[in-house]
Structures are given as C-alpha cells and as structure tokens.
Amino acid sequence: MTTTLWTRVDSPVGPLLLTAGPTGALTSLSVPGQKNGRDVEAGWRHDRGPFRTAEEQLAAYFAGELKEFQLELSTAGSEFRERVWTALDSVPYGATTTYGEIAARIGVSRAAVRAVGGAIGANPLLILRPCHRVIGANGSLTGYAGGLERKTRLLTLEGVLQPLS
C-alpha cells in the first residue's frame, strides 16, 4: 500500500488540502466543498515537509508574484484525461480558453467537448493545473469543481476579470 502524505495550506480561496505520494510529487489539491475533492483518509500521514515548495509557490501566486508553477505533479487518469490535463498546463496565466479549444489542442472533434469538460471537472490539481482558465464558448464562467466564486476570484487575481467595486 502506498503512503499518502498530506497537509493543509491557508489561502485567499479557503483552506487547500494538498496530497502527495511517497516521492513528494503532488497528487491532488482540493478545496472544501469541491466536487470530487479529497478529504483526509485513515492511514494518510500528515507531513508538511514535502509540501514546502508548493506552499511557497502558492503564496507567491496568491500575492500576484508567480505566474507559472514549477512543481512535480503525479496524476493517475485515463490516457484521455491525461491529454486534457496536459493541455490545461499550456493555458498561460492571465488568459482563458474554451472547452472547444482544449478539444482542438488534443486533436479530438468538437463532438468530444462534453468528454473534455468531464476530464477538466475531474482535474485533481485545482489551481496548479489551471482548469479555472477554461470558460464557455460564449465567454460565460461555466462550471468549476471548486465553485464559481473561487473561479471568479482566481480569474480576477490573474487580471482576466475586473474586481468588483
């Protein structure tokens, strides 16, 4: 059985639960109330050590000082999901893309947009793998597993949206 390491980090969008495998590669970043998010399980080991770099980079991101994370990530999705998640990694800070554009990037038809949306919704690494940068074809802030309020806050932080006065 593989040991799962975990810690919690405070952030402007609420507490973040980070998990990693024994090598220290991050396996998830979840927020409270997240659809398909993780909760601490029996047998997991609390250890802040492997997460220090992630904590520093997240703090810099929320301070507006970091635009791209440089962290070791480890996910275990289907081949299709991994392709979608890799495409998310290419969406730059301060930009948005659509589900259809992600479908095109991975070479699937527009008919696969729903499947792309499902893969994006299953992204286990919120914020780090920027699924919050994916919007609807009409520009609407469609679904986000962490909630639309968090998506709005992240896109505002990145300068995509204007802060409410």
Image (spheres, grey):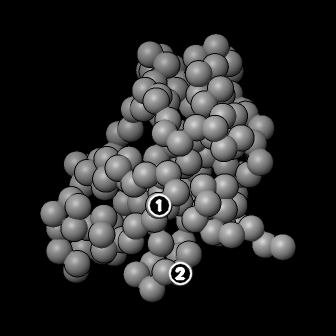
Residue type, label 1: Ala
Marking on residue 117? none
Q: Nearer the viewer, residue 4 or 75?
A: 75
Could you tell whether 61 is left or right of 81 in the image?
right
Q: Residue 31: percent from the left, percent from the top?
A: 67, 49
Residue 36 locus on image (x, y percent): 55, 55
Q: Which residue is mark 2?
A: 140
Q: Mark 1 vs mark 2: which is more N-terminal?
A: 1
Gap in Å between the C-alphas at discs 1 and 2? 14 Å
Looking at the image, is 80 positioned above or below residue 59? below
Across and down, in percent, residue 15 comes to 75, 43
Q: Give percent across and percent down for residue 110.
A: 23, 78
Mark 1 touching mark 2, by CB under 8 A? Answer: no
Q: Secondary structure at mark 2?
A: loop
Residue 86 appearing in the image: yes
Q: Residues within 10 Å of mark 1 (few under 14, many from 20)?
A: few
Q: Is residue 164 left or right of residue 2?
A: right
Residue assigned mark 1: 95
Please name the amino acid that badge 2 sits on: Ser
